[in-house]
Amino acid sequence: MKIGQLFRKKIVGLLSDHKTDSASSIFVGFDKLKSDEISQLRNNLKAQGGKLVVTKKTLVGKVFEQEKDALSKDVFKGSTAVVFTGEDPVSVCKTLFDLAKDNENFKIKAGIIENNLCDAKKLKDLSALPSKDVLRGMVVNALASPLNLFANSLNQIILKFVWAIDAIKKQKEK
């Protein structure tokens, strides 16, 4: 085998590993984006558990062979990168749409969110949702709320007893 073929095979293997490890993948266009903006995006995505991979479209097409027919032909036109989202696709979508809002050269093309094909509009809707951490906090709050109310009610009963005794003490002192 030639070195180029081995190199391509290794890249396809790495992309396949990223696809397997990630819950979702998002295809983005980055025409005329500056290298420092791409570096900043990579850092922001890394903080959210995501990873931006820029490689040849033919290699990406090999990794996403099953989904390639269902994806729009526009997805693989122009400069295309793949963002692997990790565990939380919502926070990664928010990061991507924040950059797209500030930079007209960056476009979200489509995505595969937990084996469901999504266009840019669906991804935009997904980015409006709260992140997994916020949703977990909301669930914990909803579960803890009745317990807090019960504890406060018991505390009020004890306080009313103490206030009543204090009122009797003050009355006897007069």
Image (cartoon, rainbow, N blue to C red):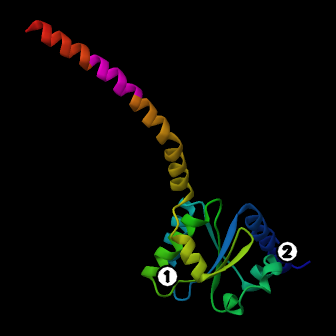
Compared across the picture, whether 159 is left or right of 7 comes to: left
Task: Residue at 61%, 61% (x, y): give it.
Answer: 88
Mark 1, residue position: 34
- Label number found at residue 100: none
Is the stretch drawn in magenta largely helix, strand or loop? helix
Compared across the picture, whether 101 is left or right of 72 comes to: left
| Quadrant of the image occupied by residue 10 | bottom right
Badge 2 marks a residue whose secondary structure is helix
When the figure is inspected, residue 151 is found, relative to residue 142, above or below; the finding is above
Mark 2, residue position: 6
Could you say which is closer to the camera, residue 107 or residue 156? 156
When the figure is inspected, residue 28 is found, relative to residue 133, above or below; the finding is below
Q: Which residues lie in the magenta part?
A: 154-162
Could you say which is closer to the camera, residue 44 or residue 89? 89
Badge 1 marks a residue whose secondary structure is loop
Q: Tell me, yes or no, if residue 39 can be seen here.
A: no
Mark 1 crowdedness (10 Å alpha carbons): few <14, some 14-19, many ≥20: few
Q: Earlier in the sequence, mark 1 or mark 2?
A: 2
Task: Residue at 57%, 71% (x, y): give it.
Answer: 126
Q: Position of residue 164 (x, y in %)?
A: 25, 17
Mark 2 crowdedness (10 Å alpha carbons): few <14, some 14-19, many ≥20: few
